[in-house]
Image: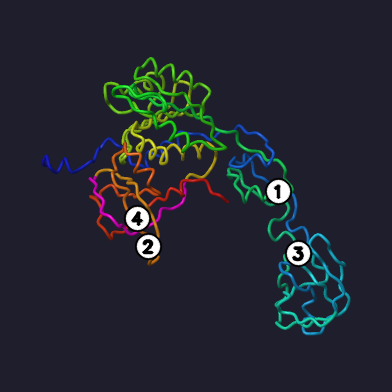
Amino acid sequence: MTTTEHADDDTDPTALSIEDARARILAALAPLDACERLPSGQARGRVTAIDILCPMDVPRFRASAMDGYALRHAEHDRTLRVTGRSLAGHPGADRLPEHGCVRITTGARVPDDADTVVQQENVARDGETVRVTVAPTPGLHVRAIGSDYSRGSTLLARGTRLAAAELALLAAHGLSSVEVRRPLRVALFSTGDELIEAGETLGPGQIHDANRALLEALLAGPSVEIDDLGICADSLEALERTLDAAHAADLVVASGGVSVGEADHVRSALEARGEIALWKIAMKPGRPLTFGRTDQGQAFFGLPGNPVSAAITALMFVRPALEHLLGLPTSGLPPLRARLASALGKRPGRVEYQRGVLETAPDGEARVTTTGLQDSHALGSLARANCLIELPLTSSGAAVGDTVTVHPFAHFANPPL
């Protein structure tokens, strides 16, 4: 291989594929067993610790799915007398007289011997009699007992994140409390002598630490509590003190100090006080990723120091690890395909994630364009983006009009329902 060819290739034979790295990480983590019981109204975003069984049939009675008239299907072709009404919360008589029907509203109890509800638009009423104008099928608009959930069936499986629909299910079935996994505790810190807190005055060669703000917002939630350990200086002694301070955490996340420079001590500290399982991934940004365990048995992630690299490695590896520890599925939503509206450069050898803006073109086609500068320090490219554009390992870039794989940021978020 010539020097020019080597410069155009980004292959590192010692780097793991994204899939292999993720599989190794998840295989090394056992979901937590500790749980607690909470009022259902306080459990949004938490994860069920057990299968929740349905305590009752829903609906508990045969209910109307429409406003209309409840009748016997065998009599639908006769003139029927309206003998009463059944309203939601105010059921009428249990039985119908011969050639009778009742006015009924949505959700109301259907009389025992009525088997069909004809919606009001399909009935002609004359005083206290009605005539069906559109022949119904038997059982039309009658909700059967237990047609949503039957008593004893699984209402919510273990490992379900409780969002709006799940909380509504609990309420609909009269469940006022729920057994959930306790929140994960994640210790978070940044490393680097160049870093200072936002709000402090910058000195020569210093920058404000953005990574803790970024990673806390990316990882924290109702089921994940962040223990912010601040900024750690570039020394083995400082790292050891910080690791000691993380003793109560389930998982430790550090950013910076994972490369091979003279001041990059994270790997050395972890080797001295734990073990390293992997430390290099065939992806860009984010090749230098360290995963292992501390000497206290905690899972440890050492993320790159550049903020875009830290964000993408957290999305691809740390968030799936947290989901796995909580007993949640980690597969996520499938990526989309979109037409490229701007050319993208790339060297083969790594899977590359470039920041993009995904939108619907006037013709209805999904199109994506770059946010500009793709350097791993460029937070602006992340703030302007709403997706990641994935370019394959062997790709040398993509031209305008090519169809590319796109990961919308919304796919990484918890479901609103």
What is the magenta range?
331-348
> What is the residue that sits farthest to the top in this orientation?
237
> Mark 2 — residue?
361
Residue 89, horizontal then vertical, whole percent: 81, 59
Q: Disc 1 to disc 3, how far (Cα)?
A: 19 Å
- Marks 4 & 1, CB-CB < 8 Å contact: no
Reading the chain from its start, which is encountered first: label 2 or label 4?
A: 2
Label 2 Cα crowd, 10 Å radius (few <14 / some 14-19 / many 20+)? few
> Mark 3 — residue?
63
- As drawn, 45 above or below 191: below
In the image, is residue 324 part of the stretch drawn in magenta? no
Mark 4 vs mark 1, foreground winner is 4
Residue 18, horizontal then vertical, whole percent: 36, 42
Does 400 sit left or right of 97 as displayed?
left
Mark 3 vs mark 2, foreground winner is 2
Q: Amino acid at mark 3?
A: Ala
Q: Amino acid at mark 1?
A: Ala
Residue 255, horizontal then vertical, whole percent: 38, 29
Label 3: which secondary element: strand
Tell me, for residue 368, which label it has, or none. 4
Reading the chain from its start, which is encountered first: label 1 or label 3?
A: 3
- As drawn, 244 above or below 308: above
Reading the chain from its start, which is encountered first: label 3 or label 4?
A: 3
- Marks 3 & 2, CB-CB < 8 Å contact: no
> Mark 1 — residue?
171
Q: Amino acid at mark 2?
A: Ala
Looking at the image, which is closer to me, 41 or 321? 41
Looking at the image, which is closer to me, 255 or 72? 255
In the image, is residue 346 part of the stretch drawn in magenta? yes
Label 4: which secondary element: strand
Does 329 sit left or right of 372 as displayed?
right
Label 2: which secondary element: loop
